[in-house]
Amino acid sequence: MTDMLTPKKRRPGLGMVFQLFWRASRVQRKRAILTVASIAWGTLSLVLLMAFGEGLGIALGEGWVGMGVNIAVIWPGETTKPWNGLPAGRAIRPRIDDMRLLRERVPDLMGVSGEIQRWRTNFTYGEKTVNGPIKGVSTVWGLMRNQIPLAGGRFLNPLDDAQRRRVVFLGYALAEELFGEEEGVGETILIDNVPYTVIGVMIDKMQMGAYSGMDEDHAVIPIRTCYAQFGEDKVSTIIIKPLEPENMKQTLAEVAKVLGAKYGFDPTDERVLGTWDTVESGRIRDNFMFGIKLFLGIIGALTLTVGGIGVANIMYAVVKERTREIGVKMALGAKANWITGPLVLEGLTYTLLGGVFGLLMAMVVIVLIALAPTDGSAAMRYLGKPTLSVPIALSTAGILGIIGMLAGYFPARRAASIDPAETLRYE
Amino acid sequence: MSDTSKALANGNIIRMEGIRKVYDTGKIQVEALRGIDLEVDTGEFVAVIGPSGSGKSTLMNLIGCLDTPTDGHYELSGQSVAKMKKDELATVRNRRVGFVFQNFNLLPQISSFENVEMPLLFGGVSRRKRHQRVEELMERVGLGDRMDHKPTELSGGQMQRVAVARALAMDPDIVLADEPTGNLDSSSGGDIMELFAELWEQGRTMVVITHDAALARRANRQVEIHDGLITTDTRS
Ligand SMILES: Nc1ncnc2c1ncn2[C@@H]1O[C@H](COP(=O)(O)OP(=O)(O)OP(=O)(O)O)[C@@H](O)[C@H]1O
Ligand SMILES: [Mg+2]
């Protein structure tokens, strides 16, 4: 008998905890299911909120790149300060040739291009005529403004401009309107009754920022061709891109100095050249996205915490309900860890089980949304691509783990403080 | 009998000196035991008797290491336990003591087999040996055919026999019982008394608290407590 009851060599530890937990968990099925469901719900909210934040960030980023990265858009306006004897209120209108001036005088410039914008132009292909905007631009504009041609086409090149060729690069929406399913490149279209050759069609791209309509609706022709046909050499806007984005502010100041010297205005007069600095607004956008993600993450984590409080509550109830049982086990020789271990494990198991279910549901939702068509709906295009990332998965797992441990730990601590003598007193 | 009880065959299993127990319930302090000196030899069958509130259960909790005394010296099987830590006391309870309670204190949601198995589980006994031991014990108390029954599916007398089997599981030095027949009808109570007498005859040390004069007469020694003090101690 003595021999039979000597314990195994290895001290009972984790194995004991698992065994006791398994025995206890058979009892509380319904409760366990409710708890798991609340954690699953919290996890679902957390993951979806974070995934939508991520998707929105990606969409914003893509849309941003769509208009071009680290560029500034400059609108010539009117002076508001008198300068060297000249009155305020004069309109300043830079011309095509001023772009060469800027290129020569402003240091560290990656590119500069004027834009001559015409809003209502007739495009005719065969029997079909559509009305839309057209821009005259320099070659470098295509690089700065992210104009990528579909296979088989190209953007404007310097020869097109120098020789005033009648060639046109079309936004894909305009091209689709004109040609339908047909290949547009190589065809001849009439622009206000003058024949042009289509040399390229832009790819479908996400574009979020715009200052003169969307690129997909535009036609683009060499700026000198534009001047030749329409007789206007004053630019409507100037696009610049510094070599280093950090130098944007300086570069803009240089542009104002060069143009101010030529046209006679105070370079510090901010109204003369209206500017949209995308470096600055990109920074604002990044901060904004960080704020949104943080906000969504916190909301999700709070939802999950509510689930965790549910687990803790149930574990407290379990401890209370099992007080006598715990007292009996202590009387029979259970050590504190053998009482608390299974409780912590129980809390953790409910939490992690709920977490796995929540994560699976979130993945299903994300896949379903990804399958849903986004054509035609801009809102869907920007909001409808929730994305699961490794950081999201890791932070969710981390939050779940912490909540699970805490939800089991505090009730377990109460269990360990139970006084068996008190509990087993016969009332 | 275990090695320790053999080693102590000629000595005391319980040696208490000047044991006091004060319950501090905030405003009032209750001195439940006021200086107990008690020695119990191996193989004795001690009945503890006394009026309600005299401190019998308190004494049993101290003997069984469920609680620690406020004052005094206590050795169980030659080991001083008054200053032990919680987990050490748990081990002592597991190895040295078997408890039988008035209200059985079986866990209601698990089978009688698993109830009896529990101390063996805490003792780190292997699965195979646990099964062998539980079967042997259930046979011993005459419930070999009730192992899969939950306590709620058993009569009071049967429940108490399961509790006795559980108390014997780790082959303890001493069996402690607090009013073991208090909740039983006279016939089931008689069965339990019979069982206790048999255990004693087989050499087991027993300490039984009882109001039951018949059970007290079965013991070889009667200790009477009044108001936290031992007033009479007679051997028959
Ligand atoms: N946990 C406790 N807190 C406060 N007082 C207690 C506690 N346990 C016991 N007492 C008090 O200590 C005294 C002795 O109680 P104990 O339970 O040992 O008596 P008893 O002899 O077993 O009585 P009974 O025959 O009714 O079971 C009583 O006055 C009781 O009220
Ligand atoms: Mg009592």
Image: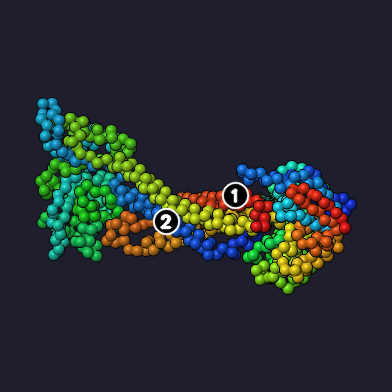
Specify the farthest residue to the right.
B10
Residue A256 % position (x, y): 21, 33
Q: What amino acid type should be assigned to the residue bearing mark 2?
A: Ser
What is the distance, in whole Å, between disc 1 and disc 2 at their CAs? 30 Å
Q: Residue at x 73, y 51 (%)?
A: B55
Q: Which residue is mark 2?
A: A45
Residue A186 % position (x, y): 22, 59
Q: What amino acid type should be assigned to the residue bearing mark 1?
A: Arg
Quick one: label 1, few (<14), some, or many (20+) residues within 10 Å? Answer: some
Mark 1: which secondary structure?
helix
Q: Name the chain under label 2.
A: A
Q: Which residue is mark 1?
A: A413
| Closest to the observer, A17 or B139 | B139
Tell me the quarter of the image containing the N terminus of chain B.
bottom right
Tell me the quarter of the image containing the C terminus of chain B.
bottom right
| Closest to the observer, A359 or A26 | A26
Residue A284 % position (x, y): 32, 42
Dot 1 or dot 2, earlier in sequence:
2
User: In the picture, residue A20 is in which quadrant?
Assistant: bottom right
User: Where B9 falls versus A81 (above or below)?
Assistant: below
Mark 2: which secondary structure?
helix
Quick one: label 2, few (<14), some, or many (20+) residues within 10 Å? Answer: many
Residue B178 % position (x, y): 73, 58
Q: Residue at x 59, y 62 (%)?
A: A25
Specify the farthest residue to the top.
A84
User: Is residue A338 in view?
Assistant: no
